[in-house]
Amino acid sequence: MVIRLASATALLVALAACSSKPEVPASVTTAPAATTAPSGRKYLLERVDDASVVQLYADGFTQLPLNEKQLVYHLTQAAIAGRDIYWDQRYAHGLAMRGVLEQILTHSAGIDAATLTGITRYTKLVWINSGPYNNLTARKFVLAVTPEAFAAAGAQAAKNGAVFATASGESLDAMLTRMRPLFFDPKVDPMVTQKTPDAGQDVLQASSNNLYSGVSTADLEGFTEKHGLNSRLVKQNGTLVEEVYKVGGRYDAPIRAIIGHLEAAQPFATPTMREALVKLVQWYRTGDDADRKAYDIAWVNDKNSPVDTINGFVEVYLDARGVKGSWEALVYYVNRQKTVDIEKLATNAQWFEDRMPWAPEFRKAGVKGITATAIDVVIETGDSGPITPVGINLPNDQKVREEHGSKSVSLSNVTEAYDKSTVPALRQEFAWAPEEVTRADKWSAFAGELHTNMHEVIGHASGKVSDKVGGNPATVLKEHYSALEEGRADLVGLYFLADPKLAELGIFKAEDQAEIVQAEYESYTKNALLQLRRVRQGTQIEEDHMRNRQMIVRWLMANTTAIDVRQRDGKTFYVMTDAQAFREGVGRLLGEVQRIKAVGDYGAAKALFETHGVHFDPKLRDEVVARVDTLQLPSYSGFVMPKLTAVTGANGAITDVTISYPQDLTTQMLEFSKASAGLK
Ligand SMILES: [Zn+2]
């Protein structure tokens, strides 16, 4: 599970305000990350439509001992090696489209300036979103030049030496004509993932991702998947075939390249981490679910290594069924300074579990192995980059979680980069009263980060499901599972934020608690309104984290007296007026959400999201968009990763690894593409 910065406005604005304030409140025990960052360096690199491009820094890397630098280096190579797997999973034509665009951009002399600007802008959005679909709305975006101008640009690039991957005997013109609907027609393959399609449509048929080919939900009845997470399901001559992602299977070439780098990394790893890397290689070789499980267990048992990686088919958000894993890779080291507070939550996980506001039979008897760490990431690719989560809790296998625990990480340098790259602008526009702004100035950054940590450490890690759902509620809750689980984790955070235990643990001072809770509840409430700016088309929310946040706030509006909807000067405000009623409602809703997960009550999940989480009033959205557009706030960010360079000695051995910051999206994306081994 990941937590994305979907509550961006709350957190972004909050963080931005923090950076504009020289003094951090005394009770903020999390030290500001800026202490080691040179001042005046560039975080926000550029804006592309409603995306911002942000440089990520990993300041602690230079202080790592050489063996850890070498380890990180090989793991980052493995991360780059697998990048194209995700591109292909996301859209069958994604890599071909990227190839055309990159050839044009790298052979651009003499191309009409306006055309080149249009192609460049589009290519950057394609790079950031790993294909032609917006990561927030799941909708296709198209190239805003004419097909004729695009063809002329292609011809000019060819004259300059560009080599296009035309089919055999096919001219460049013929290829661009064949690909025209991909670049220009929003109605061709309109949605990458469509979890709630129009009546009569099938979720798999309505989704244009490449996790399935020619398959509808009805085909799956009576079919047993052996490789749910790591296969593409294809209907061939009326029969379902699992194309397994493994050596000798689908994605053979990149998987072999990944294995090579993972094996090169092994000698530099701690024994427990080496064990996990060995098991990971084994899973890539066989593709068997038993090996996946062995790897999950080895990975979660590696609790204290200073460096770690996530590499494989992990998150299931791309799949409308919530079963197939998208490939992703992250490489990171522990940020010791920031880990202290998170550990306090983790070591007290059982205390929180025993007080969860749900039926006792759904409480875990012995919460074990919850490991929580603040980390700095060195690279993120595939499903985790350039657009990155701010928190992660894995593994997703419910049985492994119950028996072996889970690891949670909070991505400190990502949060820092969000903070430093954001222009404070929005808080006043959506605040009903000036006190709200003052409270947010003082506490939102701190409360937002704390809520993120609670979401991961005591949220996802909590609770027990009934044996009736077979250990995997996703199979019965289907398209509502992910959003429900995200809602559950958010609710745990909101609920315990108001518990005196946090002050007892020294996370903040008791006298500040009321104000912190008020600030976070206000931010969370306002976000339900603000996030509508991210869904500029349609009247439905698709992204799971956005659904859960919409659902929670709208449920509270319908079932408690905590939130007022007010109007002033034709503008709408969501005003949190009663923190006690808010918390009481959160507890009630959390009890119900846990019950739905535990017993796999699909009908109740569907009703909850259909009523409160999916649909919204387009007039209200238009109002929010208009207000936000005058403030020019980005809807999401794509990150440029640090770059590692190996210094080799006379015998070819790595003697040092240096880190640098490209500060340019195009340079990095072209470099990554060049490193691709191809898919076959
Ligand atoms: Zn989450």
Image (tube, rainbow, N blue to C red):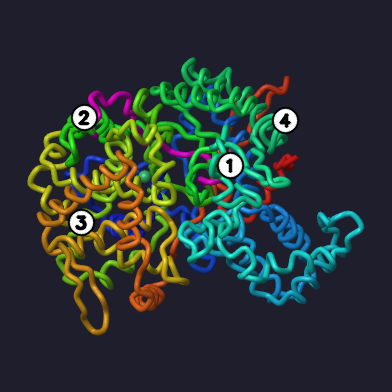
Mark sitting earlier along the chain (3/4): 4
- Image quarter for ligand 1: top left
Mark sitting earlier along the chain (2/4): 4
Please rate how many residues cluster around mark 4, counting C-alpha atoms within 10 Å: few if below 14, some from 14 to 19, many from 20. some
At a point 54% along the width and 40% down the height, the residue shown is 222
Mark sitting earlier along the chain (3/2): 2
- Gap between marks 2 and 4 measured at Cα: 45 Å
Image quadrant in which you'd find residue 569: bottom left
Residue 45 placement, left or right of 442: right
Q: What residue is pinned by disc 3? A: 521
Q: What residue is pinned by disc 1? A: 643
Mark sitting earlier along the chain (1/4): 4
Residue that lies at the very extreme toward the top in this rendered image: 271
Q: What residue is pinned by disc 2? A: 348
- Gap between marks 3 and 2 measured at Cα: 23 Å
Magenta-highlighted residues: 362-384
Q: Using the image, determine if residue 355 lies above or below residue 47.
A: above
Marks 3 and 2 close (CB-CB < 8 Å) = no
Residue 135 placement, left or right of 499: right
Q: Is mark 1 within 8 Å of ligand 1?
A: no
Which one is in front in this view, the residue at disc 3 or the one at disc 4? 4
Which one is in front in this view, the residue at disc 2 or the one at disc 4? 4
Residue 81 placement, left or right of 320: right
Q: What residue is pinned by disc 4? A: 248
- Gap between marks 1 and 3 measured at Cα: 39 Å
